[in-house]
Image: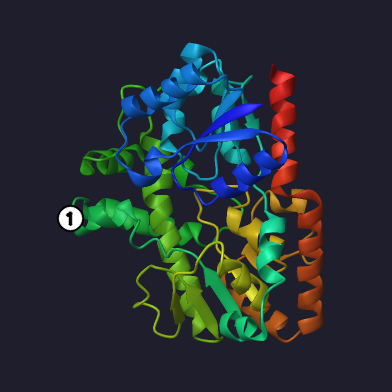
Amino acid sequence: MEILIYRYNSICEPDIIQVFESFGITVLQETAEMADKHVTPSQCAEKITGWILSHKLSFVFSVNFYPAISYACNHFKVPYVCWSVDSPVAELFSNALKNEWNRIFLFDQAQYAFFHPYNPDHIYYLPLAANVKRWETVILNMTDEDYRKYGSDVAFVGSLYSEKCRYDRLLADNSLSSYTQGYVNGLIQAQMRVFGYNFIYDTLPENVIQEIVSADPSFYKSEDVFLDTGRYLAAHQYIGMKLASVERHALLSALSERFNVSLYTRSDTSALPHIHAKGGAGTLTEMPKIFQASKINLNITMRPIETGLSLRVWDVLGCGGFLLTNYQAEIPEYFEIGKDLEVYENEEDLIQKVDYYLHHDAERMEIALRGYEKTAKYHTYEMRLAEMIRILSAAE
């Protein structure tokens, strides 16, 4: 079997390629977008067409959805397989989503429930996974110096989203009315008090949506959509990202005032004077050492991921780290809370649980071990991609 993977440098791509190859699949790679982020849809389609015409491909694969690839594959009747690892993904609104030769796998059940009705025979749910074998090659070679260097009471690896927030750019340009700013601020503060249910999408007024859409010339607008994107993207891509920034700053600030907290990020940390800012961490080389060496690994899922488990959850558990994460509706489907990992429901609960587990080493380490064992047994890339292949075979 020979497949093509269209790459854009997702951190998931090396793991997926490695596992496909371990299955005996020959993986060809189109890497133009790894070097040039300005590849146009027509150029993308042209490259895919070239591969299809020159190779007998079983399918074309990408992380996240590319309409141009879908259209090219649909034209030549070659299955296009993609696996979403992000939310939101604006391109899912393309009419290409409805193509017959799509095989789309979505990791978030809320995302799946939203898009599945538009192509019910070709959209599937598949959660993310961990490459336990890859992490083991790093962790088993850790030295005492590694444990001293990367160990801390509480560690968080991730963006603060301050540099990625489209909503902040609108504020900086004075593009939004005081009414909209006040309404959005209130909505964010209310949502921060509620975990496990995202109500921003349902409660956002139409006038606020239209103001955000009109204020940003780069708002995702395309004639090739089957549904108006305004509400979904205003809620998730603008307000949702702003909420992620506000929430991460608030929680990390509260924790760092009380505990020894290490933050690994390339974001600006000047608003967190008590944090131990460590800069960015190498995904394949440093991140697993941080997860293994730290007493508590914190996960703060950005709210546009409504029910699903982000990649960070699988990575921490796959590295044998103790995970303290916000509650997500899908967690009980895969893990036992308090046995495999721990969750917090608000800021006060987070502070109390950090304090508790820093004083209960044996219980904390037992939970970390159980989380690792369950992840290694049931939630690896080998298992996920085997399930993907099974679904693809059944769909033929």
Residue 5 in percent (x, y) is at 53, 35
**Hey, which quadrant is residue 127 in on the image?**
top right
| Residue 231 in view, yes or no | yes
Q: Is residue 38 left or right of residue 125?
A: left
**Hey, which quadrant is residue 225 in on the image?**
top left
Residue hosting label 1: 174
Q: Point out the residue furthest to the left here.
A: 174
Residue 104 in percent (x, y) is at 58, 29
Q: Is residue 341 left or right of residue 159?
A: right
Residue 183 in percent (x, y) is at 34, 53
Label 1: how many residues lie within 10 Å, few (<14), some (14-19) or many (20+)?
few
> Which SS class for mark 1?
loop
Q: Which residue is at a point 46% across and 12% down the rendered structure image?
A: 75
Along the viewing direction, whichever of 215 and 377 lies nearer the viewer = 377
| Residue 322 in view, yes or no | no
Q: Which residue is at a point 37% across and 75% down the rendered structure image?
A: 269
Q: Point out the residue furthest to the front here.
A: 54
Q: Quadrant of the C terminus?
A: top right
How many discs mark residues in the rendered view?
1
Along the viewing direction, whichever of 66 and 42 lies nearer the viewer = 42
Relative to residue 128, is residue 251 depicted above or below?
below
Residue 97 in percent (x, y) is at 49, 24
Q: Quadrant of the N terminus?
A: top right
Relative to residue 353, is residue 114 depicted above or below?
above
Callout 1, which amino acid?
Asn
Q: Is residue 106 left or right of residue 69?
A: right
**Hey, which quadrant is residue 27 in on the image?**
top right
Relative to residue 52, is residue 13 depicted above or below?
below
Q: Which residue is at a point 43% across and 58% down the rendered structure image?
A: 243
Along the viewing direction, whichever of 150 and 304 lies nearer the viewer = 150
